[in-house]
Amino acid sequence: MSSQRVTFDPANLPRPENMFERRGYIDQYIQYFHSDLAPQIAEKRESSYPVVCKFYHEKRGKIEVPSVYFEYVIDKTMWKNIFKPLGDGAAPAWPWEKGPDPDDMSGGMSTAYMEWRVRKGFPINTPHQETQQRVRDLERSLSDAQQDIERLHTLLRDTQPISSRRQHPLQSQTPLRQIKKEEPE
């Protein structure tokens, strides 16, 4: 009977926007290189949430934040805090040079941040408020478009050549088909 052994390859870095793969990598890295810190992973990650939420609220003034980047910042904060006791020289560098797009909406808005705001008594956007805001934005866009159309009509009317506004002296007032053909006697 062969035993299967899970091997960790630190060079096999997952995409930073994939939270599950990223967290798996982080957990394996800590277990592999700093096994004494492994029992602290869950506690350090959990304690990162209030820190990051407070940052987004106080420093960025955000009512809601995209989940993909928010969770990336949680992991980066956890990494920094779990290795802090080792000191700057001994702490390993964060594995990702570039994170996900801060505006990546593929995971929707962060429910963790929204729940933190609710617990703290801060306002949140509700789906109804978001819909109302979209309606107001569309109404404003429609009004702007209607005003643009009116300006274009006025501009076209004002720039129409004078000759096209008056009848040329050689042009007949009566259409040709209405003129009776005179026959010779």
Image: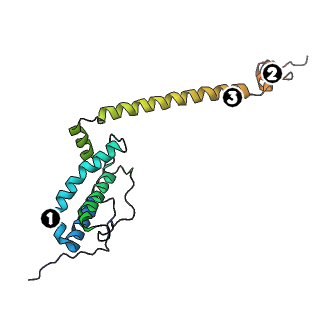
N-term-proximal mark, 1 vs 2: 1
Mark 3 or mark 2, earlier in chain: 3
Q: Mark 1 points at which residue?
A: 39
* Mark 3, residue position: 156
Element type where label 3 sits in the image:
helix
Asked if residue 175 is positioned above or below residue 28 in the image, the reply reads above
Q: Quadrant of residue 154?
A: top right
Q: Where is residue 178 in the image (x, y as percent from the top left)?
A: 77, 18
Q: What residue type is labelled 3?
A: Leu
Q: Which amino acid does label 1 sit on?
A: Pro
Can you say which quadrant of the picture contains the C terminus?
top right
Who is closer to the viewer here, 16 or 169? 16
- Earlier-in-chain disc, 3 versus 1: 1
Q: Where is residue 181 in the image (x, y as percent from the top left)?
A: 83, 20
- Above or below: residue 108 compared with residue 123: below
Circle 2 residue = 167
Against 60, residue 183 (above or below) is above
Badge 1 element: helix
Residue 59's mark?
none
Viewer-nearest residue: 146 or 181? 146
Give the position of the N terminus as an image quadrant. bottom left
How far across and down, in percent of the image, does residue 147 sit? 57, 27
- Could you tell whether 37 is left or right of 122 in the image? left
